[in-house]
Image (spheres, coloured by chain):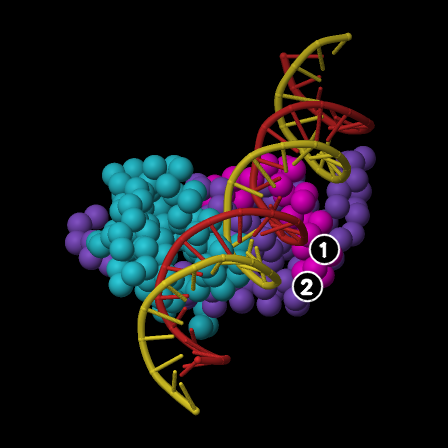
Chain colours: A cyan, B purple, C red, D yellow
Amino acid sequence: MDIQLKRGLLDVCVLTAIKNEDSYGYKIIKDMKPFIELSESTLYTILKRLEVAEMLTVYTSEYEGRIRKYYHITDCGLKRIEEFKEDWKEMWSLYQFITKGDEDE
Amino acid sequence: MDIQLKRGLLDVCVLTAIKNEDSYGYKIIKDMKPFIELSESTLYTILKRLEVAEMLTVYTSEYEGRIRKYYHITDCGLKRIEEFKEDWKEMWSLYQFITKGDEDE
DNA sequence: TACATATACATCGTAACACGAGGTATTGTG
DNA sequence: CACAATACCTCGTGTTACGATGTATATGTA
């Protein structure tokens, strides 16, 4: 997918990935892979940004000798997802604008 | 609309605005206003970028004493729009991912 | 035992990009 | 004459995705 197009989606996708269950970096990437691909460097940048924006909280937990950082969504994060859904309506009207006049496909 | 979300849309919107009829900067902004707002500085940056990418060609024409720069879409530009439609399918599946589990609204 | 692979996290530099602020110039309109 | 509208353009800034790179442990596997 076009890199610019991803910019507006990644934050909300990551928030969605931890919405129903707390998760950690490596797992988030694997869970999102069928929908959208992102590198580790990108993900950790996003997670840091979302933490600073108080859209998620972080805690560490040990699992089989390794320390994992788990991420938990906040109300602010949930609100961010809702705001995206509002933006999606505008996106949809834009899509209509772009495809208007198309008969086929 | 979220600024990051716009990034992936603006190029294609501008191309759409000149798709059916050659147009010029000031008019493009007015035509797009009902769908998406963008500043002049943004538009001229985009037009320059699309010209370099050979997605449009430019010619000047005089109208009531003022010089206008008209923009004409190329095959490459038309292709860009088609590519966006492909990306939209991925966007749509992402939207499903983000809204899965939502019953209301 | 030695080595590869998977797991797990993190930083740095770069390039792309939207935008505000500011600039130039002409044509109406009050 | 002052002001808005039309029409174009440049520069600096902040945000951001990504590749490259680094660190460390656990689990195969030869």
Disc 1, disc 2: CB below 8 Å? no
Quarter where residue D18 is shown: bottom right
Looking at the image, which residue is at 46% across and 72% down?
A104
On the picture, is C26 further left or further right than B46?
right
Circle 2 Cα neighbour tier, 10 Å, few/some/many (<14 / 14–19 / ≥20): some
Q: Which mark is residue B51?
A: 1
Pick whichever, A20 or B59, lies toward us: A20
Mark 1, secondary structure of its residue? helix
Instruction: Indicate whether residue B49 is drawn in magenta.
Output: yes
Please state the horizontal and vertical placement of residue B76, each as a whole percent of the image.
66, 66
Please state the horizontal and vertical placement of residue A28, each as a whole percent of the image.
34, 59
Pick whichever, D10 or A45, lies toward us: A45
Position of the C terminus of chain A, as image quadrant, is: bottom left
Looking at the image, which residue is at 39% across and 43% down?
A50
Task: Please indicate, yes or no, whether residue B14 appears anywhere in the rendered image.
Answer: yes
Range shown magenta? B32-56
On the picture, is B81 further left or further right than A85?
right
Quarter where residue B99 is shown: bottom left
What's the residue type where badge 2 is placed?
Answer: Thr
Task: Please indicate, yes or no, whether residue B30 appears anywhere in the rendered image.
Answer: no
Is there one chain holding both mark 1 and mark 2? yes
What's the residue type where badge 1 is placed?
Answer: Glu
Looking at the image, which residue is at 17% across and 54% down?
B103
Instruction: Indicate whether residue B82 is drawn in magenta.
Output: no
Q: Nearer the viewer, mark 1 or mark 2?
A: 1
Query: What is the distance, in whole Å, between disc 1 and disc 2 at their CAs?
Result: 10 Å
Q: Which mark is residue B74?
A: 2
Counting residues from the start of the chain, the first of labels 1 and 2 encountered is 1
Q: Which mark is residue A64?
A: none
